Image (cartoon, grey):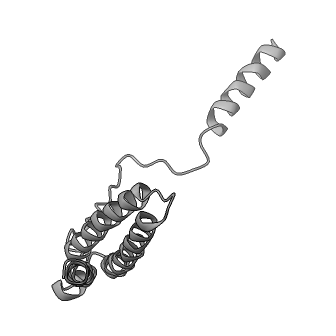
Amino acid sequence: MKKLLLLLITITTFLNVSYASFPVMDVMQNEVIQIDDEEPNTGGLLFAVLSVLLSLLSVLFVFLFIGNGFSHNGNPFPYLLLTISSVFATIFSAKEAKKRGVNRSTSFIGISILIIYFLLIKFLIFN
């Protein structure tokens, strides 16, 4: 009988003591975080600089294309592909710079370098 009574006291003590040690709330607290969509877009200047660098790289590829075309065993085809891809990358990065908030004149510097260079090549080669 003593053992049964001691067992009931022990079980009752464990039931009263073994609750969670952190506070439990009946009501859940929710915080609403609102993100503004009108944050200024960043990275536009990076794309403008990338546009200028890609346009200068395409000028280099045009020189390599012409040089390999004039050489005896030259293969100008890879440089033609590199020129075309860098021209498209210049146009893409200029449009992306414009989309990210850079003013129009800054974003199209790379494209204007390409236009001036290709007009110069046209007048030098075909005249």
Q: Is residue 122 left or right of residue 16?
A: left
Coordinates of residue 67 in the picture (x, y in percent): 44, 71
Coordinates of residue 68 in the picture (x, y in percent): 45, 65
**Where 87 falls versus 116 (above or below)?**
above
Q: Nearer the viewer, residue 7 or 59?
A: 59
Q: Nearer the viewer, residue 30 or 57?
A: 57
Residue sitting at x 27%, y 75%: 41
**Which quadrant does the C terminus fall into?**
bottom left
Residue sitting at x 33%, y 82%: 45
**Where 87 falls versus 3 (above or below)?**
below
Q: Quadrant of residue 70?
A: bottom left
Q: Nearer the viewer, residue 47 or 118?
A: 118
**Which quadrant does the N terminus fall into?**
top right
**Where 58 falls versus 3 (above or below)?**
below
Coordinates of residue 9 in the picture (x, y in percent): 72, 26
Q: Is residue 104 left or right of residue 110?
A: left
Residue sitting at x 28%, y 80%: 110
Q: Residue furthest top?
A: 1
